Image (tube, rainbow, N blue to C red):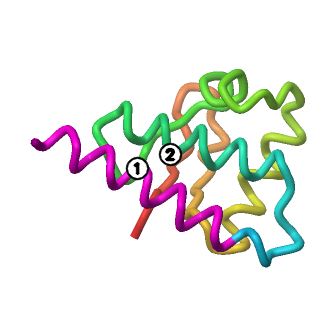
Amino acid sequence: MKESINTENEIDLLISFIESVKEDPRINMAHISLYASLVSYWYANGQANPLCVFSRDIMPACKISGAATYHRSIRELHEYGYIKYVPSFNHFLGSLVYIGK
């Protein structure tokens, strides 16, 4: 039973995000793909908040090949209020991302 509840939380987050971005002209496909990949990674890691992420782990999943595009997109998702992003600026420590409410 717990598994279905967690899956519903993940789906609810994605549905809520998609509904929100329909009317947000700032959002492009890179943002949508990145957000979906972050939610999937968050779910796979036990829905931990904050989530410790490395660009090298997320970029292949969201099909973003350029580091500048990844960093711009994740920063903009934070600026627009869809996630909370705390960059680490350290190659050995992942950045922190808060997903959900």
Q: Name the residue: 59% across, 58% down.
A: 85
Of tags 2 and 1, which is closer to the observer? 1
| For residue 1, above or below residue 66 | below
45 vs 88, nearest the viewer: 45
| For residue 81, above or below residue 95 | below
Could you tell me if the residues under marks 2 and 1 are in contact, i.e. CB atoms within 8 Å?
A: yes
Q: Secondary structure at mark 2?
A: helix
Residue 39: which numbered mark, if any? Answer: 2
| For residue 15, above or below residue 57 | below
> Does the magenta segment cover residue 7?
yes
Residue 10: which numbered mark, if any? Answer: 1
x%, y% of residue 61? 66, 26
In-image side of 78 versus 63 (left or right):
left
Q: Secondary structure at mark 1?
A: helix
89 vs 33, nearest the viewer: 33
x%, y% of residue 86? 57, 56
In-image side of 3 versus 88 (left or right):
left
x%, y% of residue 52? 46, 39
In-image side of 37 versus 30 (left or right):
left
**Which residue range is magenta in the image?**
1-20
Identify the amino acid type marked 2. Val
| Outermost left residue | 1
> Does the magenta segment cover residue 85?
no
